[in-house]
Image (spheres, rainbow, N blue to C red):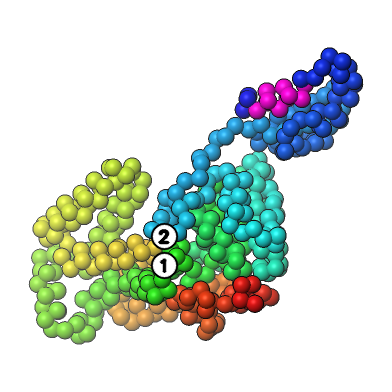
Amino acid sequence: SDDKISNYLGKSLSIDAKEKKSFFNNLFTNLENTIPNSKLKIIDNYEDMFYYLASGYTCIIIEGENKVIALETKANLDRGVQEASNEPILKGPKDSFNENYQTNIGLIRKRIKDKNLWFKETTVGKRTKTKVSVVYIKDIAEEKKVNKILKKLEKINIDGIIDSSYIRELIVENNPTILPQVISTERPDVVSISLLNGKIAIIVENTPYVLILPGLFTDFFQSPEDHYIKPFNASFTRIIRYMAFLISILVPALYIAVTTYDMEVIPNLLLISFSIQKEGVPFPTLVGVLILNFAYEILREADTRKPKITGASISIVGALILGEAAVSAGVISPIVVIIISLSAVAGMAFSDPDMINAIREWRIIFMIFAALFGLIGIFIIGLIFIAKLCSMSTLDIPFLTPIAPLYLKDWKSSILRFPKNKDKQRPIYYAPNNQTKLGDE
């Protein structure tokens, strides 16, 4: 910013002629003491000087001095604080993070005015030197979990960190899985609530998404709006999300199993209806379901990548014209359209992209096992799915906590939302040393 350079240096160099000689005799010290900039740094090596130059600082080099004065004069290249676009809610705060690192810190600071709110900053990326801050409340979060995250950040050896998703990928446990283990959010209120419960956040420069650890299975069934509506309504909505998860994964597989191998479990009238609808369809049940499922995924991807105006047109074309044409042409039976539509709508109950992708991939795995072995195949892959969930962990906390291992009090609160005057303790697996909330002591 040329204006900032002129303002800061112009004011410091605008001195009377009588004082000019003495001022320039000790120029370095005088500039250091008179430049009105709160972010003034003294640099003694080239590496730091290039870093601050690339960060929007102006460097003042004075002949005969082995140090450099750097002051922040960067232009405002970021968006202002706007409403959350990917996690909208009807009730509650509307502000969201943006690409400005200091703004994101400020959005958390203005919510938690506690001296124990700590920010441990480091730089990651050999060339980008991206600022990364680990955020936690010192007397609530476990120090060993914070140190574990910091050690993982120190071990990252990569050219550049462009987005927080790079960090998310590099710090997860060495346990390959398609299910998310880190929460990514653009909402400062979600981060603040998580910090108060004993979780740890990671702010990454140049990205509007903040990471929250640990991310457990039950966390992805909760919405920010749950904290701002009546407990009964929030609990009912959470139960619907769990049901939507099961419907989205299991319904297509169950349809394939009962129409291919286990027809005896279907009532006779329903079986006759299925048989009439399948008459004239040239493909086996699995092929028909996969064709329609992949068609839906292609439409969803096109809808996501296109502008909103054309995206709506794509949805209408896909849902009305292609679906109706496929049924009329006898390529797909009407019941398959209903099954895939029900599964797709149930998957829309989740907003996290990683969770949506995990549901999509596990749905296809269940469908394949159902086509191979029927209901027994669903049972087998269901056991494998549960075993996979039980084997995962994040920050040494089992992924299925508090369901397995069972913490009865926290298990209830993860599915239901109790009134705030009865919610007196933090989960023991997040804050074992400080469970009682201060307001209830």
Residue 343, position as x, y percentages in the image? 29, 66
106 shown above or below 4: below
Q: Are discs 1 and 2 less than 8 Å apart at CB?
A: yes
Q: In the rendered image, which quarter is residue 246 located in?
A: bottom left
- Most distant residue in the top direction: 17
Label 2 sits on a secondary structure element that is loop
Q: Residue at x 67, y 60 (%)?
A: 114
Q: In the rendered image, which quarter is residue 128 located in?
A: top right
Majority secondary structure in the magenta region: helix
Disc with the residue nearer the chain's start (1 vs 2)? 2
The three-letter code of the residue at mark 2 reads Lys
Q: Is residue 120 left or right of residue 352?
A: right
Q: Residue at x 50, y 45 (%)?
A: 81
Q: Check the picture and name the quadrant holding the N terminus.
A: top right
Q: Check the picture and name the quadrant holding the C terminus.
A: bottom right
**Residue 229: numbered disc:** 1
Near-viewer residue (84 or 260)? 84
Within 10 Å of the Cα at label 1, are there few (<14), some (14-19), or many (20+) other Cα atoms?
Answer: some
Residue that badge 2 annotates: 91
The three-letter code of the residue at mark 1 reads Ile
257 shown above or below 54: below
Real-space Cα separation, disc 1 to disc 2, in angstroms: 7 Å
Residue 314, position as x, y percentages in the image? 25, 47
Q: Residue at x 44, y 49 (%)?
A: 83
**Residue 396: numbered disc:** none
Q: Residue at x 66, y 63 (%)?
A: 137
Q: Is residue 368 left or right of residue 32?
A: left
Q: In the rendered image, which quarter is residue 353 located in?
A: bottom left
Specify whether residue 58 is in view: yes
Q: Which residue range is magenta in the image? A: 4-13
Q: Is residue 292 left or right of residue 276?
A: right
